[in-house]
Amino acid sequence: MSSYTSYDWRIARQLAVSKDNASAAVPLDTPKATPEALPESRCTIPLATPEATIEALPESNGTNSDKVKELFMNIHSHPRQMDTVALGRFVQTLRSLSSVASNPPLQDIIDNGAIPYMIEFLTHSNKSVALDASWLLTNIASGTTEQTKTVVTAIPIFVSLLSREDDRISEQAAWAIGNIAGDSPQYRDMVLNTKGSLEGILYLIKNSKKKSVVGNCVWVYSNLCRGKPRPDFDNVKSGIPIMMYVLQTYADDTGIVADACWAMSYLTDDEGNSRIQAVLDFNVVPIMGPLLGHAFPSIVIPALRTMGNIITGTDQQTQAVLNVGFLDHMKPLLDNPKDSIKREVYWAISNITAGNETQVAHVIDKKFLKMTMERFHPQRKDVQKEMLWVLSNATSCSSVSKSVFQEGVLPFLFKMQALENDAVLGKIILEGIENMIKALSVDERSLFLDDFKHLDATVFSDLRYQDCFINIKTLFQEIVLNEKLKSTPPTTTITCSFEKISTPPSGSLEKISSIPPKCYNSLSFGLGSLNVDSLEKSHLEKAHRKLTNFNSNDIEMEGKNTKSNNKCSCLKLSFLFLFIFLFLLTIFLIVFVRETGSLPSLSSLPYPFADTFSKLFHF
């Protein structure tokens, strides 16, 4: 990039793994959860209620699916017609079966028609029945998209339950909303478009005295911000100051802080820069910065992702991250045992090296280019890719190219190209080589001619690399040509006259005596004031014999050409005199006719004209 545009590079740079693929990118981010699968702080609902207990139900040795079928076969009346104790026992049993850790029978519960009843029981006057019904639907919403679809009609009811005084019911309703929103962008938007949904979640975060309620609602908010396409920023931006409040108030709770950081990472994931700026306006960077050195990876990863997203913005936004000592926090993370963290670190640094010259120089001063090269080989491919982007982007800033060169980046890239067979990594390497070669002088390029020749043997035939290779080849073309000229024996040309000849340098007569015949046409030689005493006689005789043979042939050809030229000159003069004579004769005849009124006879002409006419026309 000779004309350097940092913004385009950084906007184009994205992690290869989707931020929304929680299982592939960072498994700590959980879009859906059942009560038993989440940390203990979230499991606040008792397994038994005062009005009906699991122990009072008949035991069965069948599978969970069989238990569901048996339960529906044993009810003797419509669920709406059951008394409170029987209904409580029925709902609690279904909820318990839906919460088993291995292969819960969610589809069997759906197929037996339980969902419409459970939605209806959400507003039951008995709190235990309403609580178990809400818990059961929360578990159903943690299943597949098709299973979640069966409970989306309950979204307005869940939203209304957020304001219930019983914090167990409001917390469970928030949990259900979080599972629905975490299923897909479509269901997330359905939740956001339900009046009072986000307001109810944020109210609980700010006002609940129960930490588990706050934790659940922060997790729900992060799900409302996640997914692509991203939600309408106007629908979720009201939660930014609440997240800042959470990060400062609940700094000792790793689960709450981690979910708040994930929410901020989703809010800053922006192909433009408007969302990033909105987050920066709430002074998020000074709060997130210290979290980069946190002891728990569950906090470091989303905090690093948030800061990395901000770095992809404008130079000013990138600088805001650097101003809080971002690179100092990165050094210990380079040797972190988790590859996911190292990948995030190098991804963030690669976007800094795609910044302006001051930012690239800052990375160089902190020795990150050298540390990247030193740590390259033991890494996984996806980590190596980000490491190569760190180096390649640094080569694009022409104003600091000398500093990058002094770090040893170009020899490293040449070496990596020889070892690397991966198409994507090879492309990154060659782009870095091209950028570096452009910044070097011809003399500096010549130092890497052998490396270039190796490229010629390994890359030229590979179509994946041809564009970059052709550009590199063009940059080396002048050096290769000079090398060929140096390796070719020189052709000796002596220009003399018959009067003078300057004394050749020492040893040149040996070259003269060995001139091949094909070179004679470019050679002229004469015998002038040659200092014979300073020459070896045998060498002079050899040269003279060859040159004499050449000159004799040349003189013969020159004589023939001279005769031919003389004939042509005489013929031209004859035609010129004839033309003049005829012209003068014509003038004479015109004047004579005007004076006499008739043509002259031959005898009347002056003697010279009459004599000439008689000879020409044989009169």
Image: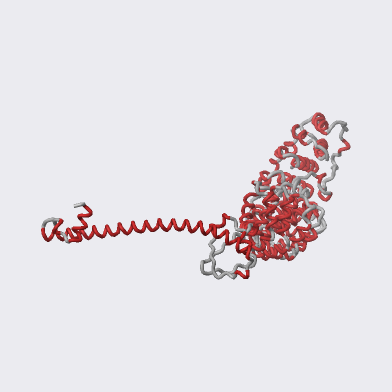
| Residue 614 drawn at (x, y percent) | 20, 55
Side (left or right) of 256 relative to 565: right
Decide which of 23, 198 is in the foreground and name it: 23
Question: Residue 424: in sight, yes or no?
Answer: yes
Q: Residue at x 34, y 58 (%)?
A: 570
Q: Picture quarter containing residue 275? A: bottom right
Q: Is residue 43 above or below residue 287?
A: above
Side (left or right) of 163 relative to 438: right
Q: Picture quarter containing residue 50? A: top right
Side (left or right) of 368 relative to 61: left
| Residue 214 drawn at (x, y percent) | 77, 53
Q: Residue at x 22, y 57 (%)?
A: 612
Decide which of 346, 595 is in the foreground and name it: 595
Q: Residue at x 77, y 36 (%)?
A: 106
Q: Is residue 189 above or below residue 66?
A: below
| Residue 296 drawn at (x, y percent) | 82, 55
Q: Is residue 583 above or below residue 80?
A: below
Which quarter of the rendered picture does the N terminus lie within? bottom right
Q: Is residue 366 above or below residue 201?
A: below
Q: How many marks?
A: 0
Decide which of 452, 228 is in the foreground and name it: 452
